[in-house]
Image (cartoon, rainbow, N blue to C red):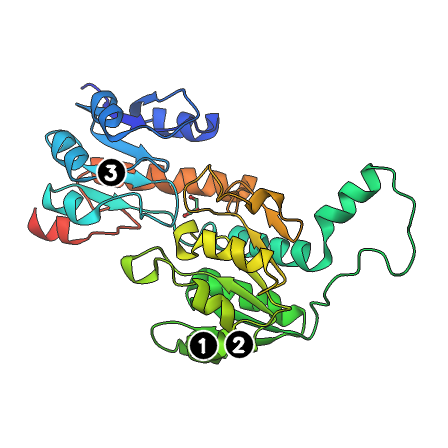
Amino acid sequence: MSKARVYVTYPLGDDILALLREQCEVVMNPEERSLSPEELIENARGFDAVLTVSAGVNEEVARALASSCKIFANYGVGYNNIDVEAASKHGIYVSNTPDVLTDATADFAFALLLSAARRVVECDSYVRAGKKNWGPMNLIGAQVSGKTIGILGGGRIGKAVAKRAQGFNMRILYNDQRPNPDFEAETGGIFTDKNTLLSESDFVSVHVPLLPSTHHLIGAEELELMKTSAILINDSRGPIIDEQALVAALQGGVIAGAGLDVFESEPELAPGLAELPNVVLAPHVGSSTTEARVAMGELCARNIFAVLDGGAPVTCVNPEVGVKA
Ligand code: DGY
């Protein structure tokens, strides 16, 4: 019997390809860029499964691939790149990679927070440039320990960030659609409304999924509510923050700084952002650890194998597909 065929939309490590090849024939887009919907249709037509890495799956893609494709296995916990309703309508499962990247992403949020607060990137440039004023008033930063952190999003990653904040003896505020008793029991976090969180926090860290309701959750009005000394952290999704409004706020001293791993139009940045010294920038690497990347690949493979065996994905986003089948 011929092997099932999997199309991978972006170059991935040999370990994941080897794992997929144990059971499937694998074809990978060799170019380090996201495919357009037209290219995805062209390249993945006739394949049994598609492993999506940031590739956009819209109604047209789902319809065009539906005659063969049984799953869009997304390499990431966020799946805002996939029109899940369209996939379900065409009987295609969607899976993501929760849990396995929680610690890596929370670690990175804290790395951004510490870097922005303690001006680590400026310090690095200073030393490399051979500057010699190493006096006590040089490159003074903001203390992190004992301060208040406000976490927008009380899910897995938000909770993991709160656990790290406990180690820094921080007061923890959080906001979500509703209180999360596990969050509170495990971290001592206090549920507050969004505006209270914004106005009382020294650090605000964003950990909500990108949905129509969270698009520009932080805009000019919200930034105005924050302390002038506050630092904003985002390693969730770029469009949750109005990036132009953030640049204006950072330029105008409305808030003190930011640590950003995600942007509204990746890999482009809003004009002015890269010129600001009070921002730490990273190229969407929140979950980029060896451990997390391997585990994400393995989970994608498990999801694909489960569906090719006639079952549902292990971490399924649209279980209704199985119900309809
Ligand atoms: C995720 O898992 O959603 C990360 O942002 C990688 O895309």
CA neighbours of label 2 inside 10 A, class few (<14), some (14 to 19), many (20+):
some
Q: For the residue labelled by badge 1, is the local secondary structure a helix, a strand or a loop?
A: helix
Q: Quote the CA–CA distance across marks 2 and 3.
A: 38 Å
Left or right relative to 94: residue 16: right
On residue 12, which mark appears? none
Residue at 57% from the left image edge and 65% from the top image edge:
254
| Label 1 crowd (10 A; few <14 / some 14-19 / many >=20) | few
- In percent of width and height, residue 19 lies at 40, 30
Q: Which one is closest to the eye, mark 2 or mark 3?
A: 2
Residue 96: tell me if it is visible: yes
Q: Which residue is mark 2?
A: 199
Provide residue 47's location: percent of width, then percent of height: 21, 25
Q: Specify the label residue 57 is tagged with.
A: 3
Instruction: Name which residue lies at 32% across and 47% down.
Output: 79
Q: Is residue 314 above or below residue 106?
A: above
Residue tagged 1: 195
Out of 168 and 231, give the one closest to the viewer.
231
Q: Nearer the viewer, residue 151 or 307?
A: 151
Name the amino acid, label 2. Answer: Ser
Q: Can you give x and y, in whole percent of width and height, for residue 154 in the image?
A: 43, 69
Q: Against 304, is 235 above or below?
A: below
Q: Secondary structure at mark 2?
A: helix
Q: Are marks 1 and 2 in contact (CB under 8 Å)?
A: yes
Q: Quadrant of the N terminus?
A: top left
Alpha-carbon span between mark 1 and mark 3: 35 Å
State which tag comes first along the sequence, 2 or 3. 3
Between marks 1 and 2, how big is the CA–CA gap?
A: 6 Å
Which kind of residue does numbered mark 1 sit on? Answer: Asn
* Numbered-mark total: 3
Outermost residue toward the front in this view: 252
